[in-house]
Amino acid sequence: MANVLVVDDSSTMREIVSGYLGKHGFDVALAADGRDGLAQLRADPDIKLVLSDINMPNMDGLAMAEKIRKELGNTAVHIIMLTTEDNPLMRDRGRAIGVTGWIVKPFRGDAVLNAFKKFCGMA
């Protein structure tokens, strides 16, 4: 079972992030949008960390985060937005929903690796 879920409508971003995390011992599941991500999280209770883009078709990342917290009642999973959005109002909305953190693309794995390991109980 996966311990990290990467949700992004860009297959390139999914490959970059999952490839990096896989090389560092994470088990990674992938989703193409928020609706798919929510289904993955329902199916795999071992996921400890969700890395999600915001702007995606079908369901955006913030809507998915809200559903994770409210509909699934999952307050344990760490949700990190990995996005090009650096809007303070969006960040505030994310905090209010229960988003754990915010990373503005590009993804720099070395800068967050230790935190991600801690979130997944690997450190």
Image (cartoon, grey):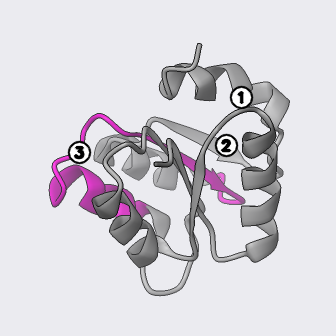
Snapshot quadrant of residue 58? bottom left
Q: What amino acid is labelled 1 in the image?
A: Val
* Magenta region: 62-86
Q: Is residue 37 magenta?
A: no
Q: CA distance from mark 3 to mark 2?
A: 21 Å
Residue annotated with mark 3? 74
| Residue at the front extreme, as displayed | 1
Q: What amino acid is labelled 2 in the image?
A: Ile
Closer to the chain start, of discs 1 and 2, is: 2
Residue annotated with mark 1? 112
Residue annotated with mark 2? 103
Closer to the chain start, of discs 1 and 3, is: 3
1 vs 2, front mark: 1
Point 35% across, 55% down: residue:
44
Name the quarter where the C terminus is drawn.
Answer: top right
Point 79% across, 63% down: residue:
15
**Would residue 92 appear left or right of 80 to someone viewing this image?**
left
Instruction: Examine the rendering and report whether any part of residue 105 can be seen.
Output: no
